[in-house]
Image (cartoon, rainbow, N blue to C red):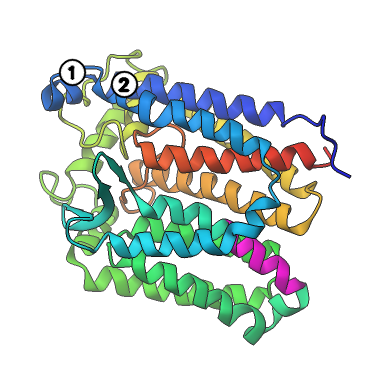
């Protein structure tokens, strides 16, 4: 029986709050010049993130932490369908918004949001309900488990790659594979999907010149430093300039219109420049602590649905953080993935905080 007096995991909540408050601080610092030149207001990004990301995000996290996580099993199917419809709407004129050759946003009057962020949460809930209903024996079967699983991924994946958004697709696949694995999938099936995925990635790189250029820059960061290699070279320069202890909070040079997306995808480079290896290392440690605590919550969840949902959520945070940090430090090709809790962006923050609320509710019912 559920204990009505149970409390959320305080350590997990503390880590979430530290990361989100730190994110506001870094957005304020990293975006001051960019906001002035673009909007005439040095605090534009800070105010916008606080009003349309941080504040509603905290409220949503609080209310979602109060909702029994089993509720999401009941609404997982309509949520997933709505998220797929939203992915289709980005291609509809006067509804979807096209920027830099990509269709990733829906604009409905004053409201705009990125459906791919909604898909991350909805596919976690849908897959968790589906995997639990299948049971371990069916999951191991190629016809009952692997092929339907691939079908679900293919539907969402096709719509995301059409935007195109290879980075988000990669994160969603990693999330789904983690959930598939923890549900008892056949290891040979996972290995086969991994090989097929690698072949698919090679194909996607080969057919799109911009992906090929990013891959060439990854192999040789000096390739076209004033063109496709500009962002990664400026990011590495920022991180290198920070040294061990950094130039000091607010003292970044690269944020003065040298480094693209200083409050978005590139914010980790500004962290490295202003706070140095020590500051960047603390952020990495916080993400590791988050993952360890969330995995413990998943391990002690009262049922398979709670366990699978928790694994999906922690996979979302850790894989996305890894991809962002690895890309901005040239460990992998550059891709447009925000750093969880820290990068500017209301849609990504709100859906992430919704997931945190669900995870906190699972922690209330876990046997820790």
Above or below: residue 194 compared with residue 28? below
* Mark 1 vs mark 2, CA separation in Å: 10 Å
N-term mark: 1 or 2: 1
In the picture provided, is 158 more to the left or to the right than 110? Answer: right
Task: Evaluate whether residue 46 shows in this view.
Answer: yes
Q: Along the horizontal axis of the image, is 65 left or right of 240?
A: right
Q: Which residues are magenta?
A: 125-135
Give the left or right position of residue 30, taking residue 24 as reference: left
The structure residue drawn at horizontal position 76% and vertical position 72%, both measured from the top left corner, is 136
Q: Is residue 210 above or below residue 20?
A: below
Viewer-nearest residue: 23 or 260: 23
Most foreground residue, 25 or 257: 25
Instruction: For label 1, count other residues whose C-alpha is less than 10 Å away and answer few (under 14), some (14-19) or many (20+).
Output: some
Task: Where is residue 82? Give x, y as percent.
Answer: 44, 60
- x and y percent of residue 215 in the render? 27, 59
Q: Main secondary structure of the magenta part?
A: helix
Which residue is denoted by mark 2 in the rendering? Answer: 47
User: SS at mark 1?
Assistant: loop
Residue 184 appears anywhere in the view? no
| Quadrant containing the C terminus in the rendered view | top right
Tell me where residue 211 sits by quadrant.
bottom left
**Circle 1 is placed at which residue position?**
41
Callout 1–callout 2 Cβ contact below 8 Å:
yes
| 126 drawn magenta | yes
* Residues packed near mark 2 inside 10 Å, few (<14), some (14 to 19) or many (20 plus): some
Q: If the image is split into quadrants, where does the N terminus sit? A: top right
Residue at point 48% right, 32% down?
57
């Amino acid at each position: 029986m559920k204990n009505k007096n149970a409390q959320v995991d305080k350590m997990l909540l503390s880590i979430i709050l530290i990361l989100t408050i730190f994110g506001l601080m870094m957005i304020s610092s990293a975006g001051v010049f960019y906001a002035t030149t673009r909007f005439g207001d040095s605090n534009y990004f800070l105010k916008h993130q606080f009003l349309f990301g941080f504040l509603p995000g905290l409220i949503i996290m609080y209310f979602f932490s109060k909702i029994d996580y089993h509720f999401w099993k009941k609404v997982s199917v309509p949520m997933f369908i709505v998220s797929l419809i939203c992915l289709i709407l980005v291609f509809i004129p006067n509804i979807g918004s096209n920027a830099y050759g990509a269709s990733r946003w829906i604009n409905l009057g004053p409201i705009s949001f990125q459906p791919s962020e909604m898909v991350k949460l909805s596919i976690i809930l849908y897959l968790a309900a589906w995997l639990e209903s299948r049971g371990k024996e069916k999951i191991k079967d190629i016809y009952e488990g692997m092929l339907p699983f691939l079908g679900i991924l293919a539907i969402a994946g096709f719509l995301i790659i059409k935007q195109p958004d290879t980075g988000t697709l990669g994160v969603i696949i990693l999330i789904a594979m983690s959930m598939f694995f923890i549900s008892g999938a056949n290891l040979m099936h996972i290995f086969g999907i991994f090989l097929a995925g690698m072949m698919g990635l090679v194909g996607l790189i080969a057919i799109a010149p911009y992906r090929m250029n990013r891959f060439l820059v990854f192999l040789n960061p000096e390739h076209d430093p004033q063109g496709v290699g500009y962002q990664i070279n400026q990011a590495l320069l920022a991180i290198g300039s920070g040294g061990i202890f950094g130039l000091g909070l607010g003292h970044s040079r690269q944020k003065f219109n040298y480094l693209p997306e200083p409050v978005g995808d590139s914010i980790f480079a500004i962290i490295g420049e202003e706070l140095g290896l020590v500051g960047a290392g603390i952020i990495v440690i916080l993400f590791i602590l988050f993952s360890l605590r969330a995995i413990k919550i998943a391990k002690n969840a009262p049922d398979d649905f709670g366990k699978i949902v928790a694994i999906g959520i922690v996979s979302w945070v850790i894989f996305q953080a890894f991809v962002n940090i690895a890309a901005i430090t040239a460990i992998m090709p550059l891709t447009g993935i925000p750093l969880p809790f820290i990068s500017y962006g209301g849609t990504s923050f709100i859906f992430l905080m919704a997931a945190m609320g669900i995870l906190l509710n699972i922690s209330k019912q876990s046997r820790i």
